[in-house]
């Protein structure tokens, strides 16, 4: 029995009757996979079509792949073209691939003899019966859900051909031979999942041949050659937490196990080794593998050698009974597969440059409030965990971009990362004014790009993430952030103060300069009060704040709206203001905010304002200069300045001086700025 | 936990932690001699007070020349307010040492926008539209110069009755409001001694050091230096 390339078994030799049932579920479509042994958790290219279709997500833009192998144990010693394929990554979350594989086949050649004897002669006809199983092509796709989980499927075309010769004697006693051919075909589908719960762990699970669609069957007379590939499941785990090395382990429901690993050697050389184990009877080693790999620019080359411990039936011939009793689970790897030297080449067209840095995780610091637009330009919006994927120190820089809400990406400074290290890099975002047009809660796609550089080489990687943008008036209830609703440079605010201070210019000119600020604050307050039509609940609403221009336009609002508006009006004429946030310990639901402003009056002149020191607060500024501040209850605005001042002063005295709220922490004073 | 829930929890803890300070809620006037007035909360006017009146913590009491008033706090403590003094009722209480220290620290906190590093922005200021007004009248001058003296007298009353914490705070406030009072060395010595009584030796020494920079009589200076040496040796 001679193998025909790649596997041809002649059934003419009946020299052994094997009763062992062997089942094999490995694949030999990738030299890297062969070399590593376990590969279900690491499949990341077109080889994922066989090993775990979810691994297709590891494709880098356009990927081309081709493979050959040589079986030195067989008599032919010929180099076989095994496969060629193409894959493409779509966006950041989807990939697909297609592969033709003329070399994934199993051919049997059965020599037969047909003898006709009559009185005068004996005619001996020899012919070959050919039985062929092949997987001519496969395709698949994968999709990534979040950062951790990818799902994929692959469909394999499976074909079965039987070629025989039929003899007949016609009416003229002439022997006629007629070639006959039977064919059967089906589609087999695999489903896979790839889970990366942590940066150091990978888990892959695949259901093989889970869906089988029969296209055509062999006729009854050829049913004995029909081969049905079994359904089974395989799981693999991989660990990448070891310095410059990874280890992997696979196991399947057919009790086949593989263990192995890969080590990053010098000069980018990858060295691999693996062991194939059979546990169907008792656990025994089936084969051992070694492999090497390397890359040059966009081309990756892998080489592996698969060596079986037992050569029985693997040298190109076997008995018919062995064939009949064997449980072939795969066209490529089965009890008749011989030792082989495999070569795989992979070319990445879209990602010619080597990836120097990888984005391992992207964290956004909570939800985004448009009112905090200026804050995000200085305070980190999030953090990206970047890993140095090169073998040398790299310099990385992040840029963050949200389409429609930013004019251009916001870049970080450069950071150095040592080989193998990870670094958390904070990033900010300079949003354009368009973020203040976001009316309600919405989800946007944000894109983070990491640009890495090492020596003269550079690379880039992108990651998309969804971010939650609140509406322009949304507020998270933090009093420290309320100040960002205060917009003294708003044209409507300026127009308001300009109009009324001009109107009262004559009156203001009669006011002693020491009381000028107080007089102007009073005029603005009273004019503001005249315009108000309604005032809402004096309590603070934690989720919605009006901008000053909106309060002026709507002529009303609750305590935080009025405090924000009056603060902006005072700030627009150069007065410093501060919010007073009160969260009563016994009534936290009655949280309230009002304000005070700096009159600029020195403490010694404070009695000019009032004989009662409870009406004002002495505060120092950052230059050590103390001045008199006046509390104002903005919700008492309709009663006029005097009453609002009185109400504010009484609240402040009771909360801060009598009940000691400031030192007990339930009263907060948040300064909005000082007059320069 | 939402913000309200968090607030409730924090507030409850704060109430527990600060339960040491009990606010005097019941201050009853039992006797009045001469002219004694009360000013309620933030009102401007002083009104006559009579025996039997109940005062609130946010009220203030003022006594005229040769006048006095007796108050009973929570039916336990009887105090007689001297003549020509102003006392805030909120000061008739004892603070914990922590509360006093926090209040003293608060005085040193400047009114500047929260700037944690360089990641914050100040609210921009629009230029004042009127510009400098050169022809404005000067201030009319401080109203009622006696008020400061009367309030300082009230502060001495606090020290005399063991309300050292509120006395210290009040005296410091008056020194800021009425700069001429800071020349009253005896009152400043009183503050330093009160800090000593409260065993706040560091704060007391700071007061004595500041006093040492003032114009003192030889006798006062000797006493101050002695105190500084004593406190230094006890460190």
Image (tube, coloured by chain):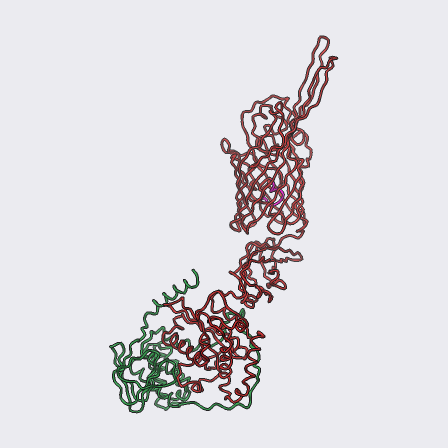
Chain colours: A red, B green
Q: Judge whether A167 appears above or below A247 on screen.
A: above
Q: Nearer the viewer, residue A579 or A146?
A: A579
The residue at the point 69 percent across, 35 percent down is A79
Q: Is residue A44 magenta?
A: yes
The residue at the point 39 percent across, 74 percent down is A655
In percent of width and height, residue A439 lies at 55, 63
| Residue A103 found in image quarter | top right
Predominant secondary structure, magenta span: loop
Q: Nearer the viewer, residue B209 or A113?
A: A113
Q: Is residue A268 visible?
A: yes
- Image mark count: 0
Q: Judge whether B35 appears above or below A557 on screen.
A: below
In percent of width and height, residue A112 lies at 66, 20
Q: Nearer the viewer, residue B68 or A284?
A: B68
Q: Which residues are magenta?
A: A42-49
Q: Is residue B195 visible?
A: no
| Left or right of B24 in this view: A609 | right
In percent of width and height, residue A672 lies at 50, 74
Q: Is residue A540 magenta?
A: no
| Residue A153 found in image quarter | top right
The residue at the point 51 percent across, 91 percent down is B137
Q: Judge whether B89 appears above or below A354 on screen.
A: below
């Amino acid at each position: 029995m001679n193998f025909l390339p790649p596997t041809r078994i002649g059934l003419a030799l009946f020299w052994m009757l094997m009763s062992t049932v062997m089942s094999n579920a490995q694949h030999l479509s990738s030299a890297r996979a062969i070399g590593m042994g376990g590969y279900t958790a690491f499949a990341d290219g077109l080889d994922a079509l066989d090993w775990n279709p979810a691994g297709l997500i590891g494709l880098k833009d356009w990927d081309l792949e081709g493979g050959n192998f040589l079986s030195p144990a067989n008599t032919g010693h010929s180099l076989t073209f095994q496969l060629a394929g193409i894959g493409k990554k779509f966006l950041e979350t989807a990939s697909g691939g297609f592969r033709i594989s003329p070399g994934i086949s199993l051919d049997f050649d059965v020599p037969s003899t047909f003898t006709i004897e009559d009185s005068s002669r004996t005619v001996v006809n020899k012919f070959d019966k050919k039985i062929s199983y092949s997987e001519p092509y496969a395709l698949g796709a994968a999709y990534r859900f979040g950062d951790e989980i990818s799902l994929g499927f692959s469909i394999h075309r499976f074909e079965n051909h039987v070629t025989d010769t039929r003899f007949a004697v016609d009416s003229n006693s002439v022997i006629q031979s007629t070639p006959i051919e039977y064919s059967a075909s089906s589609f087999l589908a695999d489903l896979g999942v790839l889970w990366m719960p942590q940066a150091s762990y990978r888990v892959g699970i695949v259901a093989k041949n889970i869906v089988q669609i029969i296209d055509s069957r062999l006729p009854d007379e050829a049913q004995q050659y029909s081969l049905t590939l079994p359904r089974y499941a395989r799981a693999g785990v991989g660990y990448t937490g070891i310095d410059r090395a990874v280890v992997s382990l696979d196991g399947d429901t057919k009790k086949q196990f593989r263990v192995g690993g890969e080590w990053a050697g010098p000069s980018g050389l990858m060295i691999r080794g693996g062991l194939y184990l059979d546990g169907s009877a008792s656990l025994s080693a089936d084969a051992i593998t070694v492999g090497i790999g390397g890359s040059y620019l966009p081309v990756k080359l892998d080489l592996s050698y698969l060596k079986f411990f037992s050569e029985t039936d693997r040298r190109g011939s076997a008995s018919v009974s062995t064939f009949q009793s064997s449980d072939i689970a795969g066209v490529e790897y089965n009890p008749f597969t011989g030792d082989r030297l495999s070569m795989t080449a992979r070319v990445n067209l879209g990602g010619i440059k080597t990836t120097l840095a990888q984005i391992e995780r992207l964290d956004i610091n909570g939800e985004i409030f448009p009112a905090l637009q200026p804050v995000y330009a200085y305070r980190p919006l999030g953090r990206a965990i970047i890993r140095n994927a090169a073998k040398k120190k790299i310099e990385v820089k992040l840029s963050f971009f949200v389409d429609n809400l930013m004019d251009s990406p916001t870049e970080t400074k450069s950071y150095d990362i040592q080989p193998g290290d990870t670094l958390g890099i904070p990033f900010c975002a300079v949003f354009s004014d368009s973020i203040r047009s976001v009316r309600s809660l919405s989800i946007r796609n944000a894109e983070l790009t990491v640009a890495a550089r090492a020596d003269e080489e550079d690379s880039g990687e992108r990651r998309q993430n969804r971010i939650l943008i609140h509406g322009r008036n949304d507020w998270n209830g933090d009093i420290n952030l309320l100040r960002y609703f205060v917009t003294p440079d708003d044209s409507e605010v300026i127009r308001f103060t300009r109009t009324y201070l001009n109107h009262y210019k004559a009156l203001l000119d009669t006011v002693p300069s020491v009381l000028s600020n107080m007089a102007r604050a009073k005029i603005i307050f009273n004019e503001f009060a005249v315009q108000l039509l309604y005032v809402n609940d004096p309590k603070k609403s934690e989720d919605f704040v009006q901008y000053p221009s909106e309060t002026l336009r709507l002529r009303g609002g609750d305590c935080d709206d009025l405090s924000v508006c009056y603060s902006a009006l005072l700030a627009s004429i150069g007065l410093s203001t501060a919010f007073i946030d009160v969260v009563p310990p016994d009534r936290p639901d009655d949280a309230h905010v009002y304000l005070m402003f700096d009159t600029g009056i020195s403490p010694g002149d404070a009695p000019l304002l009032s004989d009662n020191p409870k009406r004002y607060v002495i505060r120092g500024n950052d230059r050590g200069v103390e001045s008199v501040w006046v509390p104002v209850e903005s919700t008492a605005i309709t009663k006029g300045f005097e009453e609002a001042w009185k109400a504010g002063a009484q609240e402040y005295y009771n909360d801060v001086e009598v009940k000691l709220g400031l030192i007990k922490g339930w009263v907060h004073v948040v300064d909005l700025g000082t007059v320069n | 936990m939402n913000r309200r829930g968090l607030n409730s929890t924090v507030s409850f803890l704060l109430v527990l932690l600060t339960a040491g300070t009990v606010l005097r809620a019941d201050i009853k006037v039992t006797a009045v001699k001469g002219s004694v007035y009360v000013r309620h909360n933030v009102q401007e006017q002083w009104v006559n007070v009579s025996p039997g009146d109940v005062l609130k913590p946010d009220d203030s009491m003022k006594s005229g020349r040769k006048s006095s008033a007796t108050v009973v706090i929570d039916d336990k403590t009887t105090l007689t307010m001297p003549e020509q003094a102003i006392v805030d009722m909120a000061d008739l209480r004892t603070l914990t040492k922590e509360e006093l220290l926090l209040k003293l620290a608060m005085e040193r906190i400047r009114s500047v926008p929260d700037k944690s590093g360089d990641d914050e922005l100040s609210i921009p200021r629009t230029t004042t539209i009127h510009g400098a007004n050169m022809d404005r009248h000067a201030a009319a001058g401080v109203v009622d110069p006696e008020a400061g003296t009367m309030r300082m007298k009230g502060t001495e009353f606090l020290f005399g009755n063991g309300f050292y914490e509120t006395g210290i705070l009040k005296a410091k406030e008056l020194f800021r409001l009425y700069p001429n009072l800071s020349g009253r060395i005896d009152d400043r010595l009183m503050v330093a001694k009160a800090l000593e009584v409260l065993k706040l030796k560091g704060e007391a020494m700071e007061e004595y050091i500041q006093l040492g920079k003032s114009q003192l009589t030889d006798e006062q200076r000797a006493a101050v230096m002695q105190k500084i040496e004593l406190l230094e040796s006890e460190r």
